[in-house]
Image: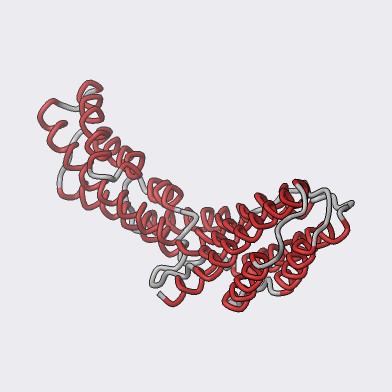
Amino acid sequence: MFRIGYRTIKTAAGAAISIAIAQALALDFYVSAAIITILCISVTKRKSLKVSWERFLACTVGMLFGFVIFETIGYHPVALGILLLLFIPSMVFIKAKEGIVTSSVIILHIYTLEQINFAIVLNEIALITIGIGVALLMNLYMPSVEKDLKRDQERVEENFKVIFQELVNYLRDGDSDWDGKEVTETDVILKRAIGTSLRNIENHLLRNDDYYYHYFKMRQKQFEIIERVMPFISSLTDTVIQGEKIADFLEALSEGVHPGNTTIIFLERLARMKEEFKNMELPKDRQEFEIRSGLFYVMHELEQYLIIKSSLRSKRSG
């Protein structure tokens, strides 16, 4: 389906405004203002500021290079080639490589005019200022992604609950017809949400709104633990009393999947359960020993799962 995104609209509007201002001021090469605006439209506010600064710096240095080389060697292709051979590495060195294309436009203006004086420099600075300034104004608007992040948060938590409940069913019944689609879906959502939350951080100039980023990174680490635990539980061929107790724990854990922090309660309960298991009589045979060993591993991973969740709260308060 044909769609026009907000960035396309901003680019079109910004280019039109830039060229209108430059044309109204009767600037030479006024269409270049629109080109500069198009190049400076970015996906985030912070990137927009960074790119704009690099382009302004590169354009200023480019005019200096043009003055020195063209006035020394002359206005012909060899001089232009030498200029670019020196200019491009210089921009990379001073970390302004984003401005190479924009400054090349300014340099070509000087080359076309075959002279450089105060009026030409003033004209080029005006083009740069208009192009970059309009782009910065356009980039002040960035659509909020809070709703998307909240939706992904709710979906991930719902999937965690389903996965835990399916593990509970397997521990209790030793069988399951679950297709595991929540596992694949969760992996996709987490990768997408982490990218979205990073863009959300970049769109806040005066503060780091990084809660969602840390939240989804935390869930990603927890999800890795869940993926490690699943094969162990699915390999169990029989049920034991320890398995029943872990099933009860997982069921309670599934009900506690939410943004809040209740890890202390679950860690204490897990510690009591581990101590209870240690005081039980030894396994009767090899099969029970292997099952109980696997369940102890599951308990260890669940402890790590809870510790990871507690780290989110420390990041928010730190």
Q: Nearer the viewer, residue 70 or 172?
A: 172
Tell me the residue at 38%/50% (across/down). 33
Tell me the residue at 70%/66% (across/down). 280
Number of marks present in the image shown: 0
Tell me the residue at 15%/44% (across/down). 117
The single residue placed furthest to the left in the displayed view is 72
| Residue 211 pos. (x, y %) | 51, 70
| Residue 39 pos. (x, y %) | 43, 47
| Residue 141 pos. (x, y %) | 51, 66
Horizontal side of residue 168 vs 297, given as left or right: right
Horizontal side of residue 73 vs 152, given as left or right: left
Q: Nearer the viewer, residue 60 or 192?
A: 192
Q: Is residue 180 visible?
A: yes
Residue 165, picture quadrant: bottom right
281 shown above or below 51: below
Horizontal side of residue 42 vs 79, given as left or right: right
Q: Nearer the viewer, residue 122 or 7?
A: 7
252 shown above or below 80: below
| Residue 212 pos. (x, y %) | 55, 67
The single residue placed furthest to the top in the displayed view is 78
Horizontal side of residue 204 vs 157, given as left or right: left
Q: Is residue 184 visible?
A: no
Tell me the residue at 53%/71% (across/down). 310
Instruction: Give the image's coloring scheme.
Output: secondary structure
Give the position of the C terminus as an image quadrant: bottom left
189 shown above or below 62: below
